[in-house]
Each structure stands twice: as structure tokens, then as C-alpha cells.
């Protein structure tokens, strides 16, 4: 048995190390380390409740809108507010723009560049992949970065600026949209659709969204040469490397529900357990700090009662990440979980056949780009210029609320307690907190730690490519992990 420490990882938001115990050319066990403590939960104590709308988005520069929405929903609950219909649509559009940008950035700038590594130089597909996806200098970056920049104009119209907009409020959005701006939004989304259909998919979004089985996906890939469309290019490389057999975690997936479509969610709330959707009981969530660098706790605590107090360094912890569990079980979150819970047949078929793995995670994320852009076109049409975008209310001096949403990387929750008009407690569980959690007091690993077990390590590798693929398949955001 030998130990290999991989990290810090490049092309990851924040700091990350992975400690691997190796035997027989494979990973036998892993410890995932979040080495950076930030303390936002401590910073928010004693502040006026609405200050959360200023502080929480600054947890992250990638998914600041998701943090804003979670904070606004927690405040809406303590204020007893519903959200104005126009405001709900505007917030969904802002949120969708950020999440789609995150998915696009992950695919092109974080994940695909690993196939340009020299360790793959002997593969027949390597030269084309390196030319297309090499970090920053590949031909894909020349097309994707301008398209992404134009896409983010959605933020300027609806949120004022990005990141860290203050336009999202408990009762809606402060940025009312005129009829001219509604038309501009439609133009931006239409241009982005054309980019996706030309560059990422080389096909209509609706056709990609309707793919329902593994066999249909394979037949679609074979319709055109492997390098026709970047998604098809990924599928060909994934098949050659067997990414569908790499990085399998557990069988429990969770979604808080994404986008507040009329009467529910675009992607519904719930759990997916071993092939079927089941209801989600939020009261079963608790955070274990047994193997984290926090002050000892007698038992795992529900987030509404949670504590985030740094320890004295004498314990056995190995990460600043807590270990959130649902009824004592580790849970995977992200696009793959959203689509499983929502019942998308392609993702259900992929996971039913091979479990949650590197291939299925990337397919789910790219598929979600198509699904969300199609939905955004409907939402823009549903806006009603001239009608209210925001309702208003007051925070009770003693109250508590929960704000739940789905960031690009998965389920995000804020738990707020107000006493005497000030924040008495503020606890956050971010998506990467779920996915990159350490072992709990029962020794059960988090999703990434489990997914790394069995990963192959080639002779002499110090940054094993299989480990890189598995880690990046979760699209980690480490600054959110320990906020």
C-alpha cells in the first residue's frame, strides 16, 4: 500500500487535495480535503437579516445567483412573502443563465481539456481532441468564450450586473423589464440557441432533449463523424476510454427542485433511490463533523441547529468540509440527480445500466443545457411588462426560514434564524459539501471518496488522469464547500 496526494487541482474553483491509498495499480481508499476555511456563517451572526442578500452571494463568484436565491427564499419565509409572478419568471431566467453558463464553462474549460494531456498522446483520437480542447489555446475556446460573453448579457438586462447582483429580493426582482428589453432577451437566447445547435450539438436542441435511451444516444452519435459537434466528440472519447465504468458512487440522488414553474418546479423535488423516485423529507438532513476540523459535537445536527465553530486542531479531522447526510446516508447531487428525480428517460437508462459515473454526469450536464434553454424561451414569452416584479414585507423580530434551490452543481440550502431582529444563526449546505464530504462517524465515505475507489493509476502517474476525470465529473466549487 502506498499513498499519493493529488493537488492542488487546477481548473477548479477554490482549493482541493485528494489523498489516495494505492494498491495493485488502483485506488483502495480516498480522503477528500477542503483545506480553506472562510467562515461566512460566523460573519453573518449578529447582522440584520437582509444583510444576507449582500454577504451570501460573495461566497462564490461562479454561482453567486444561486446563493442570492437561497438567501432570498429564506428571508421570504421569515417575512411570509410570496413572489410576484413577473419576479418569479425573472429570477428563473437569471438563475438559468448562470447555471447554463456554469455547465458550458465546465464542459469546455474544466472537463474536456484533460483529453489534451500528453498521457493520451498514443490514442488515435488525441490529436483532434488536443487541437479542439487544449486549455485556452484550443479552437473551442475561440468560439465558446465570445458566445458565453454574449450570453451573460441576460444578466445585464435582468440583474443589473454579475456576479453578486442585488436585484434578487425575497418578493421578486428589482429590475422590471420593458417590452423592448423582452425582445432583446429573446434575441440573446435565440443567438445562443444557434451557437449550441451549430457548435455543441450539431443538431436541434429539441432532438437532443428527446433522446430517451442509451441505444438512441449511441445511434445519434453515429449519425455523423465523431468530431461533428463537441458533444458527439465527447461521446466518442468517452466510449474509447470507458468513462461509463469510471467513478461510480452510491445509488441515492437528491434534488431540491429547480426553477419555480407555475405550480411547482421545472425539475421536481425528491430523491432517486435504486431506480425509483421517492419523496424527500428535509427533516432527515443532519451534518456530521466527526472527521472535519470543527469543534466536537456529540451528534450530527440538523442544519437549523447547526454550528460552524473551528476546532483547536487536536481532533482527527482531515477537511473543513462537513459531512451532510440524509437519514445517515451519503447523497449525490447535481444535474444527474435533477434529471433522475425528474424522470428524464435517458439519464434514468444510463444510471440504471451503469450507475452514476463520469459519463452519465457529463451527459446529464450537457443535456440540461438543451432542456433549460428551451424552457427559457417560454419564460421570456410569459413576462408581462408593466406589471409588478416585486412584493415587499417585513422580517419578524423572532423567526426562522429555509431557502432551498438548485445551483448548477446541485442542491443548495440556507437555514436562517432571527432573534431580536438580528441573525442568530445562519447555516449553509452547498452542493459540493454533499458531494465532497469526508467520512462520517460511522466511517461511511462521501460520494467522491466512494467514486474514487477502484480508479486505475498508471505506473509513475503523479496526477492520475482517471482521478482527474472523476473529480471533475462532479464539477466541484470548493469555495462554496466551506463557504
Image: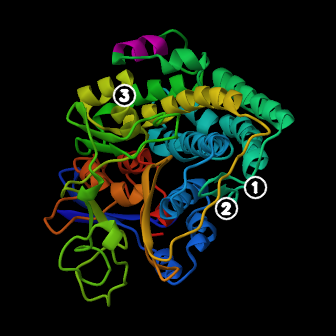
Label 2 and label 1: CA atoms lie apart by: 7 Å
Say left or right for 106 vs 139: left
Label 3 and label 2: CA atoms lie apart by: 33 Å
Label 3 and label 1: CA atoms lie apart by: 34 Å
Which numbered disc, 3 or 2, marks the residue that appears first in the sequence? 2
Q: Of the residues tagged 3 and 1, which is closer to the observer?
A: 1
The reply to whether discs 3 and 1 touch (Cβ–Cβ < 8 Å) is no
Q: Which quadrant would the N terminus be assigned to in this image?
A: bottom left
Q: Of residues 360 and 456, which is closer to you in this image?
A: 360
Question: Residue at 77% of width from left, 54% of height from top?
Answer: 160
Question: Residue at 73% of width from left, 36% of height from top?
Answer: 147
Q: Quadrant of residue 309?
A: bottom left
Q: Of residues 237 and 181, which is closer to you in this image?
A: 181
Colour style of the rendered protein structure: rainbow
Where residue 377 sits: x, y (%)?
66, 27
Judged from this view, the residue extending furthest toward the left is 442
Specify start and end residues of the magenta stretch as a single range.
Answer: 215-221
Say left or right for 280 vs 257: left
Q: Label 2 belongs to which residue? A: 164
Amino acid at each position: 500500500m502506498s499513498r499519493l496526494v493529488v493537488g492542488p487541482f487546477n481548473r477548479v474553483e477554490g482549493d482541493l487535495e485528494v489523498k489516495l491509498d494505492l494498491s495493485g495499480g488502483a485506488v483502495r481508499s480516498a480522503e477528500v480535503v477542503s483545506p480553506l476555511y472562510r467562515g461566512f456563517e460566523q460573519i453573518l451572526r449578529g447582522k440584520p437579516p437582509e444583510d444576507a442578500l449582500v454577504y451570501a452571494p460573495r461566497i462564490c463568484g461562479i454561482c453567486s445567483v444561486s446563493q442570492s436565491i437561497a438567501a432570498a427564499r429564506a428571508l421570504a419565509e421569515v417575512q411570509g412573502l410570496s413572489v410576484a409572478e413577473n419576479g418569479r419568471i425573472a429570477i428563473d431566467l437569471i438563475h438559468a443563465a448562470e447555471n447554463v453558463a456554469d455547465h458550458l464553462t465546465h464542459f469546455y474549460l474544466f472537463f474536456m481539456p484533460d483529453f489534451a494531456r500528453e498521457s493520451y498522446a498514443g490514442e488515435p483520437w488525441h490529436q483532434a481532441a488536443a487541437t479542439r480542447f487544449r486549455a485556452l489555446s484550443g479552437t473551442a475556446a475561440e468560439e465558446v468564450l465570445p458566445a458565453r460573453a454574449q450570453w451573460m448579457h441576460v444578466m445585464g438586462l435582468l440583474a443589473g450586473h454579475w456576479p453578486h447582483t442585488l436585484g434578487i429580493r425575497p418578493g421578486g426582482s428589482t429590475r422590471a423589464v420593458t417590452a423592448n428589453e423582452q425582445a432583446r432577451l429573446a434575441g440573446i437566447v435565440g443567438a445562443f440557441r444557434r451557437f449550441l445547435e451549430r457548435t455543441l450539438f450539431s443538431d436541434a436542441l429539441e432532438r437532443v432533449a428527446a433522446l430517451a435511451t442509451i441505444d438512441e444516444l449511441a445511434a445519434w452519435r453515429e449519425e455523423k463523424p465523431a468530431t461533428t459537434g463537441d458533444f458527439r466528440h465527447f461521446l466518442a472519447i468517452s466510449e474509447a476510454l470507458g468513462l461509463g465504468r469510471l467513478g461510480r458512487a452510491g445509488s441515492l440522488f437528491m434534488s431540491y427542485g429547480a426553477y419555480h414553474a407555475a405550480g411547482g418546479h421545472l425539475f421536481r423535488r425528491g430523491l432517486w433511490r435504486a431506480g425509483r423516485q421517492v419523496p424527500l423529507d428535509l427533516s432527515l438532513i443532519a451534518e456530521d463533523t466527526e472527521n472535519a476540523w470543527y469543534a466536537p459535537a456529540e451528534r450530527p445536527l440538523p442544519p437549523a441547529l447547526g454550528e460552524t465553530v473551528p476546532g483547536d486542531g487536536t481532533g482527527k479531522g482531515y477537511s473543513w468540509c462537513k459531512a451532510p447526510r440524509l437519514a445517515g446516508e451519503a447523497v449525490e447531487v447535481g444535474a444527474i440527480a435533477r434529471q433522475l428525480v425528474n424522470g428524464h428517460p435517458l439519464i434514468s437508462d444510463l444510471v440504471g445500466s451503469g450507475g452514476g459515473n463520469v459519463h452519465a454526469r457529463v451527459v446529464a450536464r450537457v443535456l440540461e443545457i438543451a432542456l433549460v434553454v428551451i424552457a427559457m424561451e417560454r419564460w421570456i414569452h410569459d413576462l408581462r411588462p408593466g406589471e409588478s416584479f416585486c412584493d415587499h414585507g417585513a422580517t419578524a423580530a423572532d423567526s426562522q426560514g429555509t431557502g432551498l434551490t438548485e445551483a448548477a452543481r446541485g442542491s443548495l440550502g440556507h437555514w436562517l434564524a432571527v432573534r431580536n431582529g438580528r441573525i442568530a444563526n445562519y447555516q449553509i449546505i452547498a452542493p459540493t459539501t454533499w458531494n465532497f464530504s469526508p467520512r462520517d462517524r460511522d466511517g461511511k465515505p462521501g460520494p467522491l471518496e466512494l467514486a474514487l475507489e477502484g480508479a486505475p493509476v498508471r505506473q509513475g502517474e503523479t496526477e492520475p488522469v482517471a482521478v482527474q476525470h472523476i473529480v471533475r465529473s462532479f464539477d466541484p466549487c470548493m469555495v462554496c464547500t466551506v463557504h
